Amino acid sequence: MSLMDFFRNRNKPATASVAKERLQIIVAHERGQRSQPDYLPQLQQDLVEVIRKYVKIDQTDVQVALENQGSCSILELNITLPDR
Amino acid sequence: MAKILVVTSGKGGVGKTTTSAAIGTGLAMRGYKTVIVDFDVGLRNLDLIMGCERRVVYDFVNVINGEASLNQALIKDKRIENLSILAASQTRDKDALTQEGVEKVLNELREQFDYIVCDSPAGIEKGAYLAMYFADEAIVVTNPEVSSVRDSDRMLGLLASKSRRAEKGEESVKEHLLLTRYNPERVSKGEMLSVTDVEEILAIRLLGVIPESQAVLKASNQGIPVILDDISDAGQAYSDAVDRLLGKDVAHRFLEVQKKGIIQRLFGGRE
């Protein structure tokens, strides 16, 4: 580090810690998705279509998640219906 | 029993081929019969890094298709005994590598060699998949930079779910982290992720840290694996990594900023 750098770099936040924080979040998120079975996106799509026969909903109004607790798996469906 | 080692990363340009060449050469120098296999079909480059580009007659795909025998295609290194190279094909046919074909060649290689080092192409397409599928151990090459770390994590996910060991329910592929292009000075300034940062995120055992070094380009310019430049920092760091791979307990070097003289400190000498 030269003398000039020394003055220039003072007071600036370290970008490496920003990188670490961002990585920790995205990596944790992607690991969570990885453990889910491949059929989930298709299941979500099919569910949206079935519900759309009756109610007008958006693609994002159906949330599907699979949770494993020991030997038991829980498929959690969360469907948000529009305001009446 | 022969060991299959894959050098992989997901991201391109992080140093997979440099690492394959260095680690393969290092293993051969320690007396193990070693072959380095280039899986990057269509973008052959290991031959250039190893300095044998003019000696390639037959390649990996020729052997798979039965157009050449394995021994015709293997290129013996002229510097190091025990070391051979199997070049990738320059074909543009994306389906040139088949799972059965790769398995057949690897099984044949197992009979002749102690270590089979598979140099993976970048990405997660077929070539990269086949390079890691049969692996017993994986060296995940990572740069201290966000996209490389994320891609490495993705590769680790694939190794844990799509490798032969994972599919057969055998003991999982042994994963090693190799951090390359590491610049301690930038780390100390808070401009670059540190070894501990990357270790914390990826949570796999650290095989080595290769400092950013002029020696790497100098070596590749000449077609010499950088591990043969044993006075360079990168060469020594690779050598330590090979020892660790073989189970030796070697302290990590080149993690701290090299001390500079007062003149360099004031005016900022060039690396």
Image (cartoon, rainbow, N blue to C red):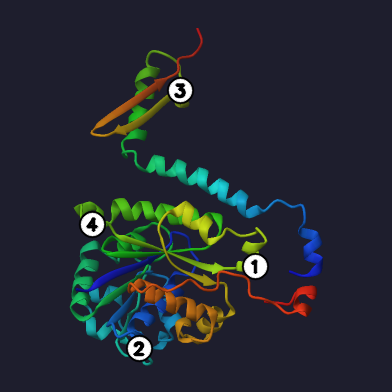
- Residue with the mark numbered 4: B171
Q: Residues within 10 Å of mark 3 (few under 14, many from 20)?
A: some
**Camera-side residue of B170 and B237:** B237
Task: Answer whether labels 1 and 4 touch (C-beta < 8 Å).
Answer: no
- Residue with the mark numbered 1: B185
Q: What element does badge 2 sit on?
A: loop
Q: Locate residue B132: give its quadrant.
A: bottom left
Vertical relation: B133 (above or below) A1: above
Tell me, yes or no, whether dots 1 and 2 are on the same chain: yes
* Label 1 to label 3: alpha-carbon separation: 49 Å
User: Is residue A60 found left or right of B134 in the rendered image?
Assistant: right
Q: Amino acid at mark 2?
A: Asp
Labels 1, 3: front one: 1
Q: Locate residue B207: give its quadrant.
A: bottom left
Position of the C terminus of chain B, as image quadrant, is bottom right
* Label 2 to label 3: alpha-carbon separation: 61 Å
- Residue with the mark numbered 2: B77
Labels 2, 4: front one: 4
Labels 3, 4: front one: 4
